[in-house]
Image: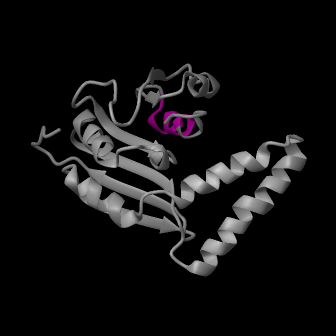
Amino acid sequence: GVGTGLLAREALSIIGPEGRLTGIDPSPGMMAEASLPAATLLQGRAEQIPCDSGSADMLSMGYALRHVSDVDASFAEFHRVLKPGGRLLVLEITRPSSRLTLLMLKAYMRIVVPAIARVVTRRTNTSQLWRFYWDTIEACIAPAEVLAALQRAGFTQVKRHVELGIFSEYTAIKPMGTDRP
């Protein structure tokens, strides 16, 4: 899910001119918005990545896990594409565990942000987009299930770090000496 390329641009600044970045997204329109001339952009999905086995040192997915239809198939693909010792980073917004925080975030995402966006963009459909965005966050796979799916795919050192109760950072490593898909 390279999307508009926001995270990909940050990755390019980290890897520098010697590095190579491949962005994948199912939407040609999103890839056109990304405007990443220093990257290779391929149309594809997390469940079937159009890259060779063992071809990546690192794989990242930023805020797109909630759009994946089969997490187990996706993580198996991530494992397949990574080289042994390769690192995985998955960033996602997850439902807060506290009921009060959940209600506050829901009100913020469904009422406050759409109202501000409607004024700034002068578009009437803004609230629909933000409602969809919130619905995808609310329906996202639970963190414990993400961790278990990463382990089922064969990853080790599987961890989750949380910021502000909603920003989840999942990390994992493909073990050395494994070519298991």
- For image coordinates 79% across by 53% down, the residue present is 114
The percent position of residue 138, horizontal first and vertical second, equals: 55, 61
User: Is 87 positioned to the left or the right of 170 in the image?
Assistant: left
Q: Does 47 sit above or below residue 157? A: above
The percent position of residue 152, horizontal first and vertical second, equals: 21, 54
Report the number of discs.
0
User: Is 122 positioned to the left or the right of 10 in the image?
Assistant: right
Magenta stretch: includes residue 53: no
Q: Which residues are magenta?
A: 8-16
Q: Does 48 sit above or below residue 162? A: above
Q: How is the image coloured?
A: one colour
- For image coordinates 48% across by 44% down, the residue present is 67
Q: For the stretch drawn in magenta, what is the main secondary structure?
A: helix
In the displayed image of the protein, which residue is found farthest to the left? 177
User: Is 169 positioned to the left or the right of 117 in the image?
Assistant: left
The percent position of residue 122, horizontal first and vertical second, equals: 89, 41
Q: Does 82 sit above or below residue 143? A: above
Q: Quadrant of the C terminus?
A: top left
User: Is 168 positioned to the left or the right of 181 in the image?
Assistant: right
The percent position of residue 40, horizontal first and vertical second, equals: 45, 21
Q: Does 117 sit above or below residue 5? A: below
- Looking at the picture, tell me which residue is in the foreground, 17 or 176: 176
- For image coordinates 31% across by 25% down, the residue present is 51
Residue 129 occupies quadrant: top right
